[in-house]
Image (tube, grey):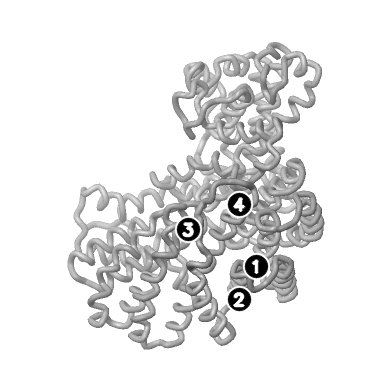
Amino acid sequence: MTFLHEPEEYAKNLGEYDELNEAEFSPEESKEEIIARLRDISAKKKKIADIQNEIIREYIERFEDGEVTLDEEAADKLYKFIESLTVQERFVMDTAVAIRVCRLLYKYYHDVGNREKALYAANRGGVCEMQRSAELEEHDFFEFPRLIEEYFPIIDELDQKSKWALLVTYSYRIMIKTDEGLNSLPELFPKVENLIISNLDKVEDKGKAKILKFQLYTNFLAELGMMLRQDEGSRKHHKPLLHDVDIEKNRELIERCLTAIEGSFEELPINPLQTNAIRINIETMRYHLGQISFEELLRRYETVAADDLRADGGGTACLFAYAMYLNYLYNCSPYTPEEDERRAQEKISEYMPHVLEMKKQKQFQFAYGILVFLNSTSLFGDFLEFYDTVLAFTVYADKALYVHTVMVKEISRLLLTRILEEKPEMMNGVCGWSTDYILNHKEEVIELLEQCAMCHDIGKHYLLEIVSNSSRRLTDEEFSIIKTHPGNFDIVCEKDHMESPRLKCVRDCALLHHRWHNGQGGYPELPQTENRPFVDILSIADSLDAATDSIGRPYGKGKTLDDLSKEFLDMGGTRYSREVAEILVEPEIKAAVQEIITTRREEVNYKIYAFNEY
């Protein structure tokens, strides 16, 4: 069977692509130098992406399509492909691609009876699913732990490597994030625990066996702790319970797990990040079991944060401790809302300088910790304070996303300014405002649209591992996940307790900017609101910037403004607003937009990449 690319080439290209993403820029460089470098990086990324897509076709798609049947020689190539993507035992590069290869390999090796390689493929697939479970807020795709359960009756016939792969992979069975799956966790866990613990003595490396047992219990308590916190929050804020976990019914199980963790905690070789994360879980469970007071819980969260800062552990555990403090204050405190707010603002003021100092680190766990912290800060205070904070972190997390956000704001402001001059009645009803109010408060209206534009994509923060992966075509699964980003606004900014008309407008724009003007297409399937006039502007500005950008995105040459203007008009009344599309083709507006997507885009890129701000 012919393979034009070596199995290791895909991983090598990923490394080169990451190096391009990590390129550093300096204020000492001129605008021309930075723009030239960005264009060169974009061109190199496009070249890598073309090769990666060829490799995916060669190593995956032709076997998935049934065009070619996997044989021993091809399976060996795919096996080496997965090995090259494996950085360490619990980390695999490009999980979406790796999972597809693992599916092919598991089926082939299972069918031909090669247990060792089938379990290796399942293990790699399970690791990928574990990584993705941290990247996605909800999921239920842990297929590999379910598949390998059939190997337990013959575990004594397996070699040591295969036994270990079976036990480790099956331990991921409890890592479920959908509400339906979580609700079955207290019943599922004893079954998983029994299968693993009863077979651990078959593992010769007793040190590894102890760590696996420890991780099984810590993962279970982490998931259960989240459920208990959500239930307490639902009770406090008079909402339907998500899980209705019976703490007394599960007390014996929880105490047994807690005892097992505490009994081996100090003697195991665990890194500082894991140590502090486990301390957070232990203290959380002690609170839910009634062993410590709420005040003591908050003090212990602060102790973990302080210890992490002193130990220079990277800040991730510190971020989670900060987030847990604020989250428990909101969901579980016995205080009045006023007291919750006072304590929260005091702590946010104290924590924020530390967090802003940390934000320059580049690692996924840290970036996720930032998101958890941001979500917790959003529970309190004024939206504009949160707005400034989340934008500061967008620059850190993904500069290309921030450039896009600023460009959408610039184009939207231009279009709205003309509308307010010529057809202010188009905006009637936005934010509950009448046409008369809009005419007398134009600056306020423009300012609100700018806020909507800057927040329209903040739901992508929970999908940055996918959003920023432009080294190849997105898979169908990834595109489905990307389509959830509008709804993720409510995950990043959890402000249902202060639903003002302005915030509702910002939220509507985030939720609906990919929904068609006529409501008959796009996503998500939600009805339009009184804020649709703002959504109509943002939809065109969003599409226009994405389609014309050829500086920071590896898409090759962008479309021309003439081509896009025609598309908007052709789809006027369906996907886009015809009234907004008609304003876009006015000669004066068209010239101004052309200036924004050329000269202005260069200026925006320069300021963001050179100075990390705009």
Quadrant in the picture for residue 452 = top right
Q: Report the residue at 34% width, 56% height from top.
A: 100
In the picture, the disc for residue 235 is: 4
Q: CA distance from mark 1 to mark 2?
A: 9 Å
Disc 4 to disc 3: CB gap under 8 Å: no
**What is the three-letter code of the residue carrying label 3?**
Ser
Chain-order first, disc 4 or disc 2: 4
In the picture, the disc for residue 275 is: 2
Residue designated by label 3: 133
Residue designated by label 1: 317
Instruction: Give 196 or 127, whichever is nearer the viewer.
Output: 196
Q: Nearer the viewer, mark 4 or mark 3?
A: 4
Q: CA distance from mark 3 to mark 1?
A: 19 Å
Task: Evaluate whether residue 610 shows in this view.
Answer: no
Instruction: Give 336 or 558, whichever is nearer the viewer.
Output: 336
Look at the numbered disc 1 and give the secondary structure of its residue.
Answer: helix
Chain-order first, disc 2 or disc 3: 3
